Amino acid sequence: MEPEALGALLARINAALNFSSGVLLVTGWVFIRRGDTRRHRMSMLGAVTTSALFLIFYLTRFAITGTHSFAGEGAARTIYFGILFSHMILAVLIVPGVLRLLYLVWKDRFQDHRRLARWVHPAWLYVSVTGIVVYVMLYHVYGYI
């Protein structure tokens, strides 16, 4: 498989993983609101797994194809880079938050977990959704150079 074709395939897989993470984050939130801690735990561990797989595939795609220059112009370019910048910053910031949440659960510190999750969860969901938006804008709407 040619590098560009493999890169495009990995980008599609990453979009699917982002979508899956987003769905699992929402279902995990619904389950904990209903008091179903078992299903909450399964959903959130699924979100951690799909996010970790995303990172592996993203780094692989980056190693194969490198960066892409967004082809959109004007307002589309401003919007794209605004979304991309916020996505990248939050993606980096949520990693220690997610690891801390896992640690707190492991130590049965559920009140601390809940307090931190109120900040990490929406940021993580934002990263999942904006990852899909960036993918659609870059690969399907405007393209890249």
Image (tube, rainbow, N blue to C red):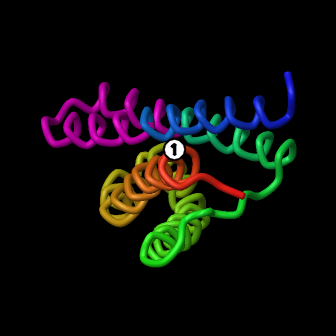
Q: Is residue 59 left or right of residue 104?
A: right
Q: Position of residue 45 (x, y in %)?
A: 48, 33
Q: Identify the image quadrant of the N terminus.
A: top right
Q: Position of residue 35 (x, y in %)?
A: 16, 36
Q: Is residue 30 left or right of residue 42?
A: left
Q: Which residues are magenta?
A: 21-48
Instruction: Identify whether 86 is placed above or below 113.
Output: below
Rendered residue at 86%/42% (across/down): 64
Label 1 environment density (alpha carbons within 10 Å; few <14, some 14–19, many ≥20): few
Residue closest to the far left: 34
Tally the numbered discs. Answer: 1
Q: Can you tell which quarter of the image residue 116 is in?
A: bottom left
Rendered residue at 36%/58% (across/down): 117
In front here: 88 or 31?
A: 88
Instruction: Identify whether 98 is placed above or below 24.
Output: below
Q: Is residue 107 left or right of residue 9?
A: left
Determine the secondary structure under disc 1: helix
Rendered residue at 31%/26% (across/down): 38
Secondary structure mainly formed by the magenta segment: helix
Give yes or no for residue 37 being in the magenta stretch: yes
Instruction: Name the residue carrying label 1.
Output: 140
Give yes or no for residue 129 being in the magenta stretch: no
In front here: 96 or 108?
A: 96
Q: Position of residue 76 (x, y in %)?
A: 45, 70
In front here: 69 or 88?
A: 69
Instruction: Identify whether 28 is placed above or below 92.
Output: above
Instruction: Identify whether 142 is placed above or below 50.
Output: below
Q: Identify the image quadrant of the C terminus.
A: bottom right
In front here: 34 or 67?
A: 67
Looking at numbered disc 1 in the image, what kind of residue is underneath it?
His
Rendered residue at 30%/37% (across/down): 28
